Image (cartoon, grey):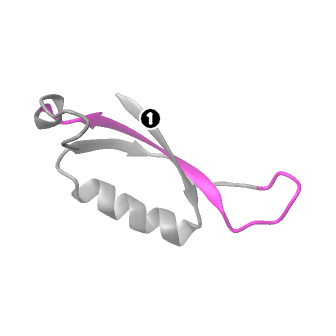
Amino acid sequence: MIRIRLEGTPEELDRAIVHLEADDRLNILSVSGFYPNNRGRRSRCGRIYIDAELTAETNSLTSEQM
């Protein structure tokens, strides 16, 4: 299993999740809730964490093929 951290606005993160879920090389196991970035300043941005597994077909690919 791998853990992926994504950062952006809620709208950007929603679009990114759609793209990642459509990728056959990745099996999404879970998506965390939205964690706002609020260290000392107001921001619309935040982060989510995705737990995923690479599919069997990905195991045979080299980094250049991905």
The magenta segment is: 38-56
Indicate yes or no whether the magenta region holds residue 3.
Answer: no
Q: In the displayed structure, does residue 18 sit left or right of residue 22?
A: right
Looking at the picture, tell me which residue is in the foreground, 22 or 65.
Answer: 65
In the displayed structure, 15 sits above or below 58; it is below
In this image, 38 relative to 23: left or right?
Answer: right
Q: Which residue: 41% across, 68% down?
A: 15
Left or right relative to 38: residue 59? left
The secondary structure type at the circle numbered 1 is strand
Residue drawn 64% across the image and 57% down it: 46
- Residue 42, horizontal then vertical, whole percent: 82, 66
Quadrant position of the N terminus in the picture: top left
Task: Locate the C terminus by quadrant.
Answer: top left
Of all residues, the one furthest to the bottom in this rendering is 11
Mark 1 residue type: Arg
User: Which x, y percent locates residue 40?
Assistant: 89, 55
Where residue 17 appears, as percent x and y from the top left, is 38, 59
Is 53 one of the magenta-colored residues? yes
- For label 1, the residue is 3
Q: Quadrant of residue 50?
A: top left
Q: Residues within 10 Å of mark 1 (few under 14, many from 20)?
A: some
Which residue, as the protein is rendered here, is positioned at the far front? 64
Q: Nearer the viewer, residue 49 or 33?
A: 49
Residue shown at 22% from the left, 54% from the top: 23
Total numbered badges shown on the rendered structure = 1
Check the image and report above or below for 2 versus 50.
above
x and y, in percent, of residue 47 in the image: 59, 52
Q: Nearer the viewer, residue 7 or 60?
A: 60
Instruction: Please tell me which residue is depicted at 25% across the width and 42% down the height of the picture.
Output: 27
